[in-house]
Amino acid sequence: MRQRLLSIAIGLVAGFAGAVVARQWPAASDPTPIAAAATREPSTAPIVPPGWDNRYLGRLAALEDRMRDLDGGATRPEPSAPAASSERAQHRAQLYQKELDHQRSRVDAHATEAIDPGWSRTQTDQLVAGLDAMIARRELVAERVDCRSKTCVATLTFPSPADALGFLASPALRVLGRDLHGLTSTPAPPSHAGAYDLTIVLDR
């Protein structure tokens, strides 16, 4: 069995809006389960997309503010340039909306795919098995996985929006798509602080 080297870029880190994009290339084997992933690699700081209500994020928002403070001001706008800061915020919000629209179009396209029965069944079973440990540890409330012929769509229900953002910044995300070509996810704005559905599109 061959592992795939997974490269993940989170939109806000590169000045974009908030999508997580992953691509994989063949490498050596390492069938690490999702349950063990967190013990192998540290998580990065979660990134809050533009426009999210901090009331629904609790201590995660406070952590992001603290990380910005520790940045030393490198990415902080100058006090004398409020217009430039506003333009940057508006640009990020526009990019974020485009990413949300793109994800919706990908989910819609997935729904029209023909079904490859063998691959669909095998890949769905593999993804669900990998998520079982997260449900057992109550990191996930529920999961729904649908694989067809070219893509899989996984809807993961987390206890809160903050838990979903934490997952996107964790090593477990890399492991989830290790047998697939890549994955994308743009977390939609939450409407409350409770259970939150995160949609991930994975490419065959």
Image (cartoon, rainbow, N blue to C red):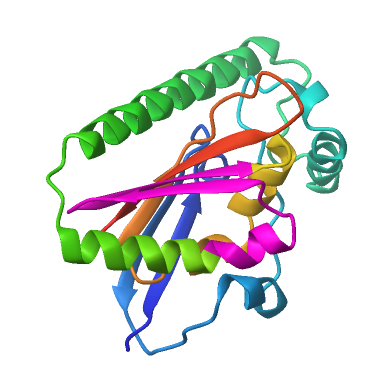
Q: In the figure, is residue 170 to the left or right of 8? A: right
Residue 123, placed above or below residue 189: below
Q: Position of residue 129 (x, y in %)?
A: 49, 68
Number of numbered discs visible in the structure rendering: 0
- Residue sitting nearer the eye, 19 or 148: 148
Residue at coordinates 64% horizontally, 53% vertically from top-left?
167
Residues drawn in magenta:
131-157
Q: Is residue 136 magenta?
A: yes
Quarter-of-image position of residue 104: top left
Residue 129, placed above or below residue 200: below
Residue at coordinates 34% horizontally, 84% vertically from top-left?
27
Q: In the figure, is residue 135 to the left or right of 4? A: right
Quarter-of-image position of residue 113: top left
Q: Is residue 15 magenta?
A: no
Residue 61 visible in the snapshot: yes
Q: Position of residue 40 (x, y in %)?
A: 66, 79
